[in-house]
Amino acid sequence: MRIAVVADGEGGGRLRELDGASPVGPVRSVADLVAEVREIETGSPEPPRWVWARTEDVYPELVRAGVRVRRCHDVEHTEALLLGHAARHHEPHSLGAAWARLHDLPVPDDPVRPLGEGTAAQPALFEADRSTLPPGTDRLDALLEVHRDQGERIGELLAPDRFSLLVAVESAGALAAVEMSHDGLPWRPEEHDRILTKVLGPRPTGGERPRVLADLAERIGEVVGHDVNPDSPAQVMRAMAWVGHPVESTRSWVLEQVDHPVIPLLLRYKELARLHSANGWTWAETWVRELKTEEGPRLGRFQPDYVVGGVVSGRWATRGGGGLQIPKAVRGAVRSDPGWVLVRADAGQLEPRVLAALSHDEALAAAAAEEDLYASLADHVGGDRERAKIGLLAAMYGQTSGDAAPLLATMRRLYPRALDHVDAAARTGEGGGIVRSWLGRTSPSPRGWAATIAAPDADRRRRAHGRFTRNFVVQATAAEWALVLLAALRQELRENLPTLPEGGGIVFFVHDEVVLHVPEDLDEAAVRAVRRAETRTREILFGDSPVRFPLDLSVTDRYDRP
């Protein structure tokens, strides 16, 4: 059963049951949408799949009220996937845009979502209408119409079952993103402050640099011979020209090529300045919510604002907080609450294993059946595991120069079907075509292709797009594997850990790693849930493939330790 729902912005809403995409029964208006969803979720033996325009506009308020749903169909995410499949990635995908296309009306732009929305800091009551529908249009009728149209478009695809799975896990990811943003990653504010003070010096006041950065800036000026603002690329480039080493940019990899005493100072300054700006004291005040505790250590929650499918490959992004790039320097601040533990699950060597499953290369699949894929390849390159890794990654990503060149020939000989798979994707990209992931996520076509092929650097541009499509077929499928794992794990925890307290469960997700926060007495049950989720993920995506996707599992009290 499906139930379409629209909120009224005042705590209530309207609902209508669906049989597939067809409405059944009357429209029901409720004054308390939270209470209605809670009753349906808890009172139904088989909870429905909720159909709504945008998860971020409805679900945060439900989660704040302690209501978590099992399944949903997110119309906006689905529209984005369908437009992408038709090579129309850049078209608006809101409910209003989808409805306008159905009625041959001008298509409105998608609304801009301000930084930081969607987190637990948002006020109560459901989001305002972001559907971009014309005034007077019935939102529920528009939702039903677009949902029916999406079902018809999915049914016309060459692999509708796979694409339906992509829609389902993308929607499940949207649910998980709201839940994780609300619950937050356990964070110790006093430990974060201690780390920053140790590395940068005491917290400065009045917008001044921290002491360590100020000392570095002074030493840089002394080495150059005059004052230099290391935060100004223009001043740094002039300073490098002054000392006889002009550079084209101040990127770290460019500076690393220069042999001069000022370079180590500049690189260290860049590293610490980024820590100060990206994860410093001001960042913590913005993104870490402190919990009220009667005694013991200060406890907090890091609450990034996730963007599901924010990257064309399907990987997530964030609107703020840098949740997908927690630097090693501050990972020591990620610690479980007293009496709780972190369960970390990391899928090592994910992309080579995905390539083995995608290409049906029996030799590579045999290697991927082992715990350490690279070690099983090493026998073919003189027993050197690192060379085996370089060779396989070079084959996947199209690297043909340097040490990779001779290894690439070996990989082509050993794993012809795997290399043919990515080579074909590269040729498609070089010809201006699109490629698809296992479930049907589609690469964007290059803009202005006709102008590109006539440009002076046409060959370089074609090769660049070929490298992109070569990578896309593997990376996008790896992102799907991670999404299926996340969805399966949500279900496993709900079904098999019913005693998990509020706020426990999945608290962090980045590319191919998931982190759970659970009471100590539930750690073994959580580990079993992760292992079952991995097995289900492999079976759902690749059936009886011999390729294994082993997870590196650890139970710990802090994120910077295994």
Image: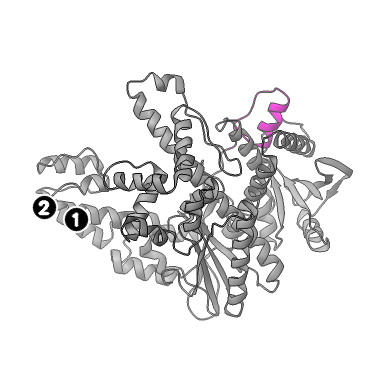
Q: Amino acid at mark 1?
A: Leu
| Front residue of 298 and 503 | 503
Residue 98 located within the stretch drawn in magenta:
yes
- Tell me if 170 is positioned left or right of 468 in this view: right
Seen in the picture, residue 539 relative to 94 is either above or below; the reply is below
- Residue 320 visible to an observer of this rendering: yes
Q: Quadrant of residue 79?
A: top right
Q: Position of residue 64 (x, y in %)?
A: 66, 60
Q: Quadrant of residue 112?
A: top right
- Residue linked to disc 2: 223
- Residue linked to disc 1: 265
| Front residue of 302 and 442 | 442
* Lower sequence index among marks 2 and 1: 2
Q: Amino acid at mark 2?
A: Val
Q: What range is drawn magenta here?
A: 93-111
- Is disc 2 placed on a helix, strand or loop? helix
Residue 318 located within the stretch drawn in magenta:
no
Q: CA distance from mark 2 to mark 1?
A: 9 Å
Seen in the picture, residue 547 relative to 500 is either above or below; the reply is above
Q: Residue at x 84, y 45 (%)?
A: 19
Q: What's the mark number on residue 18?
A: none
Of the 4 image quadrants, the one containing the C terminus is bottom left
- Tell me if 239 is positioned left or right of 523 in this view: left
Q: Position of residue 466 (x, y in %)?
A: 43, 34
- Tell me if 443 is positioned left or right of 8 in this view: left
Q: Residue at x 33, y 55 (%)?
A: 381
- Tell me if 515 is positioned left or right of 496 in this view: left
- Residue 277 visible to an observer of this rendering: no
Q: Position of residue 236 (x, y in %)?
A: 20, 44
Near mark 2 (Cα within 10 A), the count class, few <14, some 14-19 or many ≥20, is: some
Q: Position of residue 321 (x, y in %)?
A: 47, 54
